[in-house]
Amino acid sequence: MHDDPVTPTQGTIVQLRDGTPQDVTGRRRLTGLTVIAVAVIAMMLLTAGRARQVSGVAVVPPPPQIGDCVSIPDTDQVLEQMNEGEVPVLVSGPCQGARAGEVASLEDQRAYAQGDCWTPTLGYLGVPATAGPFLKSETAWQTRTAAMSYTFGPSPLQVAAGQLWSACVLVGLDTENFRPRPLIESARDAATRGGTAFDPFAICSDAPLSTEFTPCGGPHRYEMVADGFNLGPSEAEGLESCRALVSELTGLQDPSANGRLRVELIAYRYDDGGSLRKADYQQARTAGGGVTCTVSPVAPGEVLTMTLVGLGERPLPIG
């Protein structure tokens, strides 16, 4: 092994200790620099080749999953597409903070604009869509919920890659202007969690037939639980099925909460001008009207302070 050469300073002529001529050492240095240069160029070519390859291949997004968050940049455009029989393309969005909607269900089939999305959307919320096992008369119940559901499908790129699916997307509904509203937190199983989780989806008011609704997270007199259609001949049986539905939704074995809550049917019909009018049960039944299953405090001065849905064993929210 040779001794290290003296490190030169600028303008200094160096005499090598091993007697190797300077031109040989220069060739060694040149050879070493050439090897390094070739390696650097090869690395640059490989890197450039990979970048070109990635940029030239479109990345196909995978199918969505239930619970994924969705971005809806233009709701009016989505509604227009659906009215024309088209299926809008699903665009994934972030789940941090507010989100436009959530994937409530996914089917391995072609998406149709008029497909049934309401039933799986309510199921995602943890709400029964109709009376089902609570049906003790001919009345069919549809739970009142401040939400909407849209059908979305894959993009042309996803279709070209062989994806075939249909997604139902849950979107919140603002009961003041009946426009879509962002979801502040996940809507999944909100009815099961109850309380503040379901407050944004419950329908509440200070009058049983009012079209002006009150946020369920604040004081209100009535909670509108469900609408009944195809009314059976017996009002008593209709009320019994209403009470069964309230018990199922709230988790209260006694839907009257030991006499503190009133569960009642509010019958209505539509007049010739299309306005909502209060009616008796038989009048609503024969005039093509319906009934609303409602819950309110028995005491005149009391109000509800949050939704009763998902209440379970918690104290009654009465103030």
Image (cartoon, grey):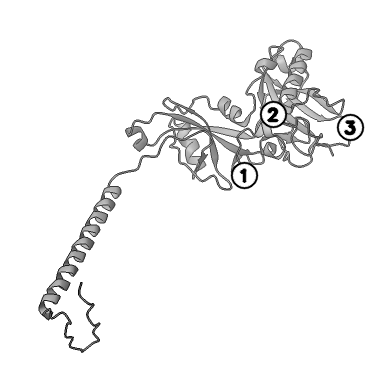
Q: From the viewer's perspective, tell me whether residue 64 is left or right of residue 282.
A: left
The amino acid beneath tag 1 is Ile
Q: Position of residue 146 (x, y in %)?
A: 64, 34
Mark 2 — residue?
Answer: 275
The amino acid beneath tag 3 is Ala
Verify CB contact (< 8 Å) between mark 3 and mark 1. Answer: no
Of tags 3 and 1, the one toward the viewer is 1
Of tags 1 and 2, the one toward the viewer is 1
Q: Quadrant of residue 47?
A: bottom left
Q: Quadrant of residue 256?
A: top right
Q: Earlier in the sequence, mark 1 or mark 2?
A: 1
Q: Position of residue 258 (x, y in %)?
A: 86, 25
Res 130 seen here:
yes
Mark 1 — residue?
Answer: 184
Callout 3 crowding tier (Cα within 10 Å): few <14, some 14–19, many ≥20: few
Q: Position of residue 240 (x, y in %)?
A: 77, 16
Q: Secondary structure at mark 1?
A: loop
Q: Secondary structure at mark 3?
A: loop
Q: Which mark is residue 299?
A: 3
Tell me what residue is drawn at x 49 percent, y 25 percent.
Answer: 115
Verify CB contact (< 8 Å) between mark 2 and mark 3. Answer: no
Q: Which mark is residue 199?
A: none
The amino acid beneath tag 2 is Ser
